[in-house]
Image (tube, grey):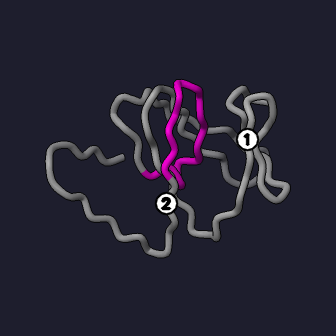
Amino acid sequence: MLRASGEGRYVISREGRQFTALELADEPAYFREEILFAFEESILFENGRVPAKSGSDLHLVHLRGRASCSWSRTERRRPWTCTRASRCGSDGASWSDGTGR
């Protein structure tokens, strides 16, 4: 993790990545560590991992607060929908709804 503060410019190489900004409205959100790019200092965060029975463990960052964050992907962006009452998904992929369901 890198912390930057002060005035000036911070130049980042995109390296084929696509960045998405997200405004959190005091709801919990979970991101895989490798895709979370940045978040505002006012957001509460906690790192953790979900052990896997086979393969690699899932390393997550739990964010909560009223602020912005951004995440990056190297693959083509696909549309996805999410409602508070249901899980999020895209092309059959399941995303956590923040409640562990």
Vertical relation: 11 (above or below) 33: below
Which amino acid type corresponds to the residue marked 1 in the rendered image? Cys
At horizontal 65% and vertical 46% (from top left) the residue drawn is 58
- Residue at the farthest left position: 7
Question: Under tag 1, what secondary structure?
Answer: loop
At horizontal 49% and vertical 75% (from top left) the residue drawn is 16
Left or right for 3, reference 63: left
Vertical relation: 44 (above or below) 90: above
Give the main secondary structure of the magenta stretch.
Answer: strand
- Residue at the farthest bottom position: 16
Vertical relation: 92 (above or below) 62: below
- Asked whether 8 falls inside the magenta stretch, the response is no
Question: Under tag 2, what secondary structure?
Answer: strand
At horizontal 46% and vertical 27% (from top left) the residue drawn is 66
Q: Residues within 10 Å of mark 1 (few under 14, many from 20)?
A: few
Left or right for 95, reference 20: right
Sequence-earlier tag: 1 or 2: 2
- Residue at the farthest right position: 92
Which amino acid type corresponds to the residue marked 2 in the rendered image? Phe
CA distance for labels 1 and 2: 19 Å
The residue carrying mark 2 is 19
At horizontal 53% and vertical 38% (from top left) the residue drawn is 61
Question: Percent x, y for residue 48?
Answer: 56, 35
Which residues, given as a range, are shown in magenta?
A: 21-37
Q: Nearer the viewer, residue 91 or 34?
A: 91
Question: Percent x, y for residue 67?
Answer: 43, 33
The residue carrying mark 1 is 82
